[in-house]
Structure formats: C-alpha cells, structure tokens
Image: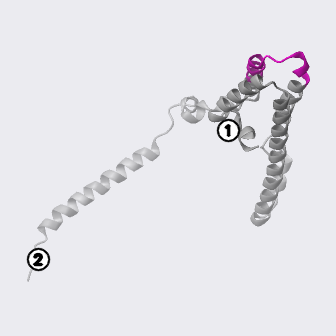
Amino acid sequence: MTFNRKPFSRLNGLVLAGLLATLGASAMAQSAAPASPGAAASSPRGQHMGKHDPAKMQAMIAKHQADLKAKLKLAPAQENAWTAYTAALQPPAGKGMRPSEAQRAEMDKLTTPERIDKMRALRGERMTQMNAAMDKRGNATKTFYAALTPEQQKVFDTEHQKHGARGEHGGHGGLEQKKN
C-alpha cells in the first residue's frame, strides 16, 4: 500500500505561507515606533494626565463646594457646620503616594524578601491612614447633615448621590451616606 503525498504537499505549502505571513506581520507591528513625542498626549492614557493635577483638583473641589453651598441656601447659623464639614473634606497636605529619594535608596539596599515585607508594612500603614481619613469624612458628613433642615437634607442627598453614581472624587462620593 502506497500513500500519495501530493494532497499534503499543497496543504503544507498553505500552512507555511500562513506562518510566514503571520511572522512578517508581527515583526512589522513590533518595530513600529511612536509617531512623535506629542503622540502620547493624544492617546487615551495621555488624556487622563491632567486629571491628577493638584491645582485642577483643588479648583474642581472648590467649585463643587460653592455650587453645593448655593443649592443648600445655608442660614448664617449653619456657617460653622459648613466650615467644619469642608475642612474635614480637604486632603492632607503633602501626603503623596510616591516615595522620597531617601526611601528609594533605603529600599534599594534591601533583599527582595525584605523589600516585599517592607512594602507590605507600608501598604498596611497607608490603608490605616486612608481608613481614618474616610471615617473622618464620614463623621463630618453626618454632623453637617444633622445641622441641615429637612429640605436641605433632600438637596444634599440628591447632590451627594449624583456625584457618587458618576464615580467623581475617586469613586467615594456617596459611599459615606449609603454605608452609614
């Protein structure tokens, strides 16, 4: 019994041509360089870079607070509660996520297991700080809310839910109200 290899040779040729085309396309895709340094700014990732500008964030927060205050139509007797509330919402000054040069130099001296343990400890500290800040904001919100009239509470609820649903302010807006 003999086998005819001609049908397989045609199939082998097609498979080989397909492999070469795939390899050629992937090689071209890998060697493509970015068009220009400004191209990163027009990319989706580049569009979000301005959102982390502290000055823009502070301006956005101030505008939101001014709008909320206008909608609430606070009485003079409620001004102290408003001031305490807005002060509690301010982020702590100088508490960035980036390590200092000294911290980086210290981390460079550690072995990998030591670095993992150090990072775990730092992450735990950061989470404790974040939880304390969220508790502070939640308590300030409850205290301010109690100082509002029932009509103002309805306005506050509506505004707070709007911002929480859209995920503004890091996605935390509205969570204090819903959780507590």
- In the rendered structure, are the residues bearing label 2 and label 1 in contact, judged by CB atoms less than 8 Å apart? no
Residue at the spot 86% in from the left edge and 48% down from the top edge: 102
Residue at the spot 89% in from the left edge and 16% down from the top edge: 76
Where, quadrant-wise, is the N terminus in this rendering?
A: bottom left
Q: Is residue 76 above or below residue 28?
A: above
Residue 27 position within the rendered picture, expressed as x and y whole percent measured from the top left: 41, 49
Q: Is 21 left or right of 106, judged from the image as shown?
A: left
Residue 152 position within the rendered picture, expressed as x and y whole percent measured from the top left: 76, 23
Residue 55 position within the rendered picture, expressed as x and y whole percent measured from the top left: 76, 25
Q: Look at the image and say whether residue 74 sits in the magenta stretch.
A: yes
Identify the colour scheme used: one colour
Q: Amino acid at mark 2?
A: Phe
Q: Nearer the viewer, residue 120 or 104?
A: 120
- Quarter of the view holding residue 138: top right
Q: Main secondary structure of the magenta part?
A: helix
Marks 2, 1: nearer the viewer: 1
On the image, numbered disc 2 is attached to which residue? 3
Characterize the local packing of mark 1: few (<14), some (14-19) or many (20 or more) Cα atoms within 10 angstroms.
few
Label of residue 134 in the image: none
Residue at the spot 78% in from the left edge and 53% down from the top edge: 123
Q: Secondary structure at mark 2?
A: loop
On the image, numbered disc 1 is attached to which residue? 171
Asked if one can make out residue 95 in the rendered structure from this viewpoint, the answer is: no
Q: Residue furthest bottom?
A: 1
Q: Amino acid at mark 1?
A: Gly
Q: Residue furthest front?
A: 150
Q: Is residue 153 above or below residue 97?
A: above
Rounded to the nearest angstrom, the CA distance separating label 2 from label 1 is 68 Å
Q: Which residues are magenta?
A: 63-80
Where, quadrant-wise, is the C terminus in this rendering?
A: top right
Q: Secondary structure at mark 1?
A: helix
Residue 51 position within the rendered picture, expressed as x and y whole percent measured from the top left: 67, 30
